Image (cartoon, rainbow, N blue to C red):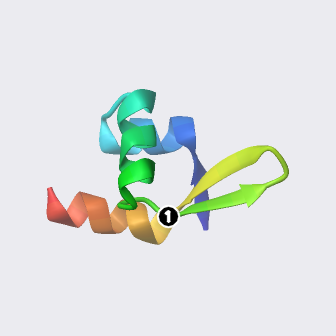
Amino acid sequence: MALSINDTAKTLSLGRTSIYALIREGRLETIKIGRRTLIRSASVRRIMGSE
């Protein structure tokens, strides 16, 4: 399963800029499908558990 950037932002109650920062830090794992960047739901759950 994977979430879009916007869905991840809503789930974590963060802005898109914060989501991209977490991606750059390596805390969120991404999947590229064409031009879309999707976030692995397992990494979102991991972030939710650590907050």
Given residues 35 and 45, the one toward you in this image is 35
The residue positioned 45% from the left and 40% from the top of the image is 20
> What type is the residue that disc 1 sits on?
Glu
The residue positioned 72% from the left and 57% from the top of the image is 32
Q: Is residue 50 left or right of residue 29?
A: left
Given residues 21 and 5, the one toward you in this image is 21
What residue is pinned by disc 1?
29
Q: Residue 37 in the image: state x and y as whole percent.
A: 66, 48
The residue positioned 40% from the left and 61% from the top of the image is 26
The residue positioned 85% from the left and 51% from the top of the image is 34
Instruction: Name which quarter of the figure residue 47 lies in.
Output: bottom left
Given residues 6 and 20, the one toward you in this image is 20
13 vs 38: above or below:
above
Figure quadrant of the N terminus: bottom right
Residue occupying the far left of the picture: 51
Q: Secondary structure at mark 1?
A: loop
How crowded pointer 1 is (Cα within 10 Å; few <14, some 14-19, many 20+) is rated as some
Residue occupying the far front of the picture: 24
